Image (spheres, helix red, strand yellow):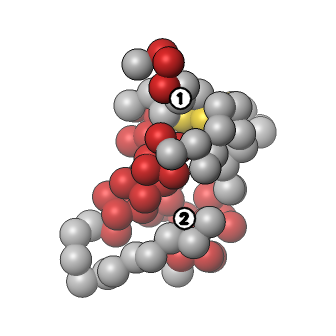
Amino acid sequence: MRYIIHKENRPVYLQLYQQIRDDIIAENYPYNTKLPSKRSLAEETGVSTITVEHAYAILCDEGYIESRQRSGYYVIYRERDF
């Protein structure tokens, strides 16, 4: 996925969070799909891994994704569950 980050606008982690969330809701990332690693997404978007981690943490808190130890982040959102 290509995410566009505007560093002069809102906080970068919120921009990233909203774009990933929109992709999950639109089922560009279907249920149980693995998301890109923090490192690869950081390299692709030109932000730090801490920024990606913050965006993923919000998605986890809101129930869109879950972290699986030593495996990565997976989509747990299904429209029928909400």
Q: Residue at x 50, y 18 (%)?
A: 80
Residue at screen point 47% across, 41% down? 25
Can you say whether 47 is above or below 30 in the image? below
- Please tell me the numbered disc located at residue 45: none
Count how many numbered circles sit on residues in the image.
Answer: 2
Above-or-below relation of 6 to 53: below
Residue labelled with disc 2:
49
Using the image, determine if residue 53 lies above or below residue 27.
Answer: below
Give the residue furthest to the top: 81
Residue 21 pos. (x, y %): 44, 47
Q: 78 or 62: nearer the eye?
A: 78
In the drawing, does residue 80 fall left or right of residue 43? left
Q: Residues within 10 Å of mark 1 (few under 14, many from 20)?
A: many
Q: Which residue is mark 1?
A: 77
Q: Is residue 32 left or right of residue 60?
A: right
Report if residue 27 is visible in the image.
yes
Q: Quadrant of the N terminus?
A: bottom right
Label 1 element class: loop
Q: Is residue 26 above or below residue 64?
A: below
